[in-house]
Amino acid sequence: MVAFTRRGGSSSGERQILSIQKKIFTIFAIVLIFLFLCALRLRASLAEQYSVSSSPKDIAKTKIVSTEIKSSVNSNRPIQVAYAISLIKCSDKQSSTSGLIDAATVLRHSVHQTSVRNPNSGSKYDYKMYAIVHKKAESCSHLLGDLGYHIIVKDSPVQTSEIRGDYLRKNVHKEWCCGADEFVKLYAYTIHDHPIVVHTDIDFMYAQPMDDLFDAMLLPHDSDEGKAARGKVELEYQDKRQSMPEDIQAYLTRDYHQVIPGRKAAFQAGFIVLRPNQKVFEKYLEVIREGNYVEGFSRENGWGGKGYGGVVGSMAMQGLPAYYYDEIAPNTSVELNGCRYNHMGANIFYDNVPNFIRKYKDLHGKCRRNVEGCEDCRETDMSLIKNIHFTNCSGCKEGAEQCTGKNDHIDPRTADYDHCMEVARTWHEMRNDLEQKIVALTGNDKVLSEGQKGTYKKDVFMGHCDADGQIGYVPIAVSKEDVAITVKKIWKESK
């Protein structure tokens, strides 16, 4: 009886244990199945969110998962924006030793001053400098490397012989500056280690941070923060604010001072803010290789026969991006106020040449943007300007360091002399700020005694000019050791 009871009790206990084990196994299986289904759903969601379409109109809608954003979030480091320039040749005046070094130095210092590395800037974004160097200019690119620019040496992404369109293939080499070599700028789209790339010409300077642009690009368009950022972006056409793309892929400005009545405005190739995207880069190359560029100055000339031609640079990086963002990937870019961003102090009214045909008397004095109330960039208050492109006001293409101080060297048809002197002074103030910091750090008084010994228009050029023109320019007087200290101590470059 006892034995029976003991065996019976033991058998009942074993059944209870087996029952509990089955329940545990069932629960565990359910949990695994649930987790598996969640993983599948998450994978599908991510695939949909970050998929890349091969349709041209969808290319720029691609959402890139940026390793830079991920690492910044995980480590609380600021997001790092790539700032790039392109060096295409070493033989022009801008790429002479003093011109190249000083322009690149002041440009980099202006980036630093408007970044998170300068606590007084108010910016939350970090930066990294790049120089996209055409292989023809590799011999002088070490000058940029010494300044902390990360050098990317490339050949032209499309060779002239690859272009199928006869007119473009036979004539692109004549285009202003560099012909087909200028397409090397497109490699900015392939700098994938950063969520945003800012590409400019070397004769450029930043006056204020661009956090509003970056925030509007990176934050969800329907979030409170994203909406606030979008509301602060200064547009060329204010009535287009409500139609801003949900996924902004580029900011650009237009060369309105070149516009002929009835023609399309070209892209201003000295400044663009973009999201790196390999598909966009490849699509650009397809367009170039196709070479569908129509000769002439009519409304049907230029890229795709759509009117994107007939102006300086239209066969290269003035006409091509305008055609791309208007026709190939519409509603993916935002046009910024050209008086505030990429400021050139240019006349954008139908007042005179260039490209104003006198027979259009009814247009005289009207805005080349074909809107009322156009802002006159020759009168824009300096406090409103975010960044400056020293091309129109310098009287030439060499940039702010050319000591253009004579009234007759500034074309009154396209610029205002007094405003241009204000614009030039901002560059020399930026250079002076760097010089003062170098002296404070190194004790090298020659930076000022030799670098600011000029007497020509000191109220504008701050001792950096001895006479008018390039011949009068006084280069920055720093040693190689001073440069190394500047990169490490002032610009806080870790590598």
Image (cartoon, grey):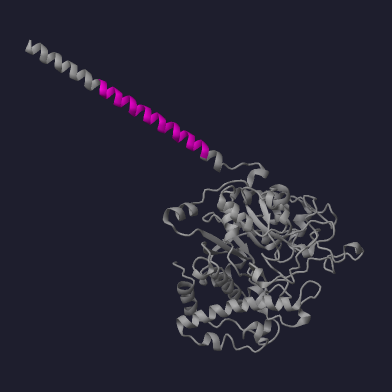
To which quarter of the image does residue 49 belong?
top right
Compared with residue 67, is residue 431 higher up or lower down, i.e. above or below? below
Magenta region includes residue 463: no
- The x and y percentages for residue 166 are 78, 52
Taking the view exactly as shown, the residue that stands out farthest to the left is 2
Residue at image coords 7%, 13%: 2
Residue 413: quadrant of the picture: bottom right
Which secondary structure type mostly characterizes the magenta part of the structure?
helix
Determine the residue positioned at 57% across, 85% down.
451
> Which contiguous range is marked in magenta?
19-45
Observer-nearest of 174 and 81: 81
How many numbered tags mark residues here?
Answer: 0
Is 473 or 386 nearer to us in this picture?
A: 386
Position of the N terminus, as image quadrant, is top left
Residue 37 in sight here: yes
Q: Nearer the viewer, residue 91 or 285?
A: 285
Residue 189 in view of the camera: no
Where is residue 266 drawn, in percent x and y? 75, 59
Query: Residue 110 lies in what quarter of the image?
Result: bottom right
Instruction: Give me the residue at 59% from left, 68% from top.
Output: 208
